[in-house]
Every structure is written in structure tokens, then in C-alpha cells.
Amino acid sequence: MSKQPRWTQTWIGGTRAAGVDLGRPGERLGLPAEGAGSIAGFGRRLAAIMIDWLICTWAIAQGLLHAGPRSGAWVGLGVFALENVLLVGTLGSTFGMRLLGVRVAALGGGRPPFGAVLLRTLLLCLAVPALIWDRDQRGLHDRAAGTVVLRT
């Protein structure tokens, strides 16, 4: 009798638990395994977005713009969106990304086009698309925009 995995193993424990090798993140995209140009890990991405959120909500929205507690969250989200569109669209990374050594790139290389940056930012502000990832560690916002977050 062959050692075929049970069909429940592929959806309960994931495909890796069933013995299916999906490869490393970024392999399908032709990216290196480590170092510059490789897929940025979850920890770096999470820390970068936390830094950006703190800068946008506390320092800018509440500190400079004096947004009150009721409107502060919405003003902070607007500043966060503006920061992402302007900085990712021109430099390829936000303040937090730059501090942690990650950048947003188009799948074909280089900076993503402005329309892709707008779409990515809109979906990032909705939060849920950014929390659903594929095996290359790209959120739905990156997949929709045709972008990937890489280490610098």
C-alpha cells in the first residue's frame, strides 16, 4: 500500500504537511533566496508598517495637524495613504521600509507604475487584502498591483 497523504492533510495541515514541496518564497518569481533582491520577511514588513503608522498618526496627524481623538484615526489613515502614494511612487519605499531595508518593486523590476501604487495603497488601507498572503509572501494588495516587497 502506497503512502499517499490523506486529502484532509492538504487543507488542515497545509500542503507542506502533506509532503508537497512548494519551493521557497520568491523562487517562482526568479528571486534570490537571501540577501538583496530576495523576498522581505513578515517581521520586517510588519515592523515597517508599524513605524509608518506611528509616524503618520501620532507625529503628523496628531502632532502637526492637531487632529482630535475622533478624527485622528481617519486623518492618520489619509496621511498614511498619502505617504505610501508619494514615497512608494517616487522612491520605492516609505520611511519605515527605508529604515528596515525593504522596498516595493514591480514584478518586472524597477519602480512600480503610479496606477499600481494607487491600487496597492488603496488595498493596503483596507487592511484585509494585506493580511492574505500567497506562497511567495505577497499580499493580495501586491498581487493585484503586480508588485513585490524585496530586501535592499
Image (tube, rainbow, N blue to C red):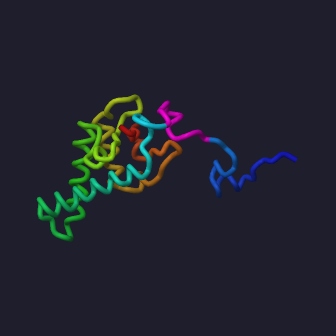
Position of 125 compared to 76: left or right?
right
Magenta segment range? 22-33
Query: Looking at the rendering, which quadrant does residue 94 occupy?
Result: top left
Position of 4 compared to 20: left or right?
right
Give the residue drawn at x 35%, y 51%. 124
Give the main secondary structure, helix, strand or loop, of the magenta stretch: loop
Above or below, 92 against 75 in this view is above
Q: Residue 58 placed where, x, y %?
A: 20, 62
Q: Is residue 32 magenta?
A: yes
135 or 141: nearer the eye? 135
Above or below, 76 against 104 in this view is below
Position of 51 compared to 6: left or right?
left
56 or 39: nearer the eye? 39
Give the residue drawn at x 53%, y 35%. 27
- Quick one: quadrant of the C terminus? top left
110 or 48: nearer the eye? 48
31 or 89: nearer the eye? 31
